[in-house]
């Protein structure tokens, strides 16, 4: 767990350095770093970490049962990793109620505003992104030790893109992100079950996700005044 959090923090720290040193957009750099991590993972499971008795499957050996997260429900596959969610809520409250949380919020509103207030924007960006990376590493540890029980190629495929959509759907609000995360989790798991039990293709989930992205972009580019003006023009010409 510690190694997962440390690795995630250091990986996110790379994006933070690019943001601080070169003003690189953190969304783009983190998505690009996802591809590097994916290919590095593929190298590991095809090479030094490949299971010697796993045949041609790119995977690591199974994790010992003593190290796996205990299951609370075999049918629902609820395991001790649920406490990770509680930790995320605690971090959310930490951000809301502390000086660091206020600084993070201020830095997000604009570098000039934060600089004029006397705070170190670069330090705040570095701390924030490393905390985010640590939580991401914790989520990865939770997936491996609580669900997969081994390292697989593509184990986190697409999660980075979905995470961006979830963050935008939740309006970058911690509570909204949690709700959006539950929605997308139900959508993805339910889509797989639906395909298996009713022969409805999983692609319907991709369509729904695409519509969500379209609506998010529309909300970001349009405002209520523009819509009212457009409706008014339509009514005048009718």
Image (cartoon, rainbow, N blue to C red):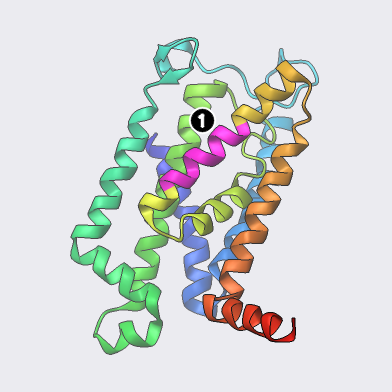
Of the pair 162 and 175, the residue shown nearer to us? 175
For the question of whether residue 47 can be seen, the reply is: no
Q: Is residue 207 shown left or right of residue 150?
A: right
Task: Tell me where the magenta segment starts and ends, as one range.
Answer: 178-188
Q: Looking at this view, is 122 or 114 the one in front?
A: 114
Q: Secondary structure at mark 1?
A: helix
Q: Which residue: 68% across, 45% down?
A: 208
Residue lying farthest to the left in this orientation: 98
Residue for point 62% across, 82% down = 232
The structure residue drawn at horizontal position 33% and vertical position 86%, both measured from the top left corner, is 113
- The answer to which quarter of the image holds residue 2 is top left
Q: Is residue 186 magenta?
A: yes
Q: Is residue 78 left or right of residue 102?
A: right
Magenta region, main secondary structure? helix
Residue 125 spot, x, y in % from top left: 39, 69
Furthest toward the front, the residue is 238
Residue wearing tag 1 = 143
Find residue 134 and report its horizontal and vertical position in percent.
41, 48
Q: Is residue 56 above or below residue 183?
A: above
Vertical side of 16 occupied by 110: above or below: below
């Amino acid at each position: 767990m510690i190694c997962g959090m440390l690795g995630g923090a250091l990986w996110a720290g790379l994006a933070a350095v690019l943001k601080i040193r070169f003003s690189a957009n953190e969304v783009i750099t983190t998505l690009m770093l996802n591809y590097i991590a994916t290919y590095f993972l593929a190298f590991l499971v095809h090479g030094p970490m490949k299971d010697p008795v796993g045949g041609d499957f790119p995977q690591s050996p199974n994790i010992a049962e003593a190290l796996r997260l205990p299951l609370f429900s075999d049918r629902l596959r609820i395991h001790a990793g649920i406490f990770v969610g509680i930790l995320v809520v605690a971090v959310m409250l930490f951000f809301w109620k502390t000086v660091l949380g206020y600084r993070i919020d201020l830095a997000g509103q604009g570098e000039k505003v934060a600089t004029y207030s006397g705070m170190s924007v670069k330090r705040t960006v570095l701390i924030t992104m490393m905390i985010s990376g640590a939580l991401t590493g914790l989520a990865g540890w939770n997936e491996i030790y609580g669900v997969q029980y081994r390292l697989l190629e593509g184990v986190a495929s697409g999660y980075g893109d979905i995470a961006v959509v979830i963050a935008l759907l939740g309006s970058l609000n911690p509570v909204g992100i949690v709700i959006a995360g539950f929605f997308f989790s139900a959508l993805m798991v339910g889509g797989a079950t639906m395909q298996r039990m009713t022969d409805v293709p999983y692609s319907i989930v991709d369509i729904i996700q695409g519509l969500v992205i379209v609506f998010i972009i529309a909300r970001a580019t349009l405002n209520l005044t523009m819509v009212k003006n457009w409706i008014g023009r339509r009514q005048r010409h009718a």
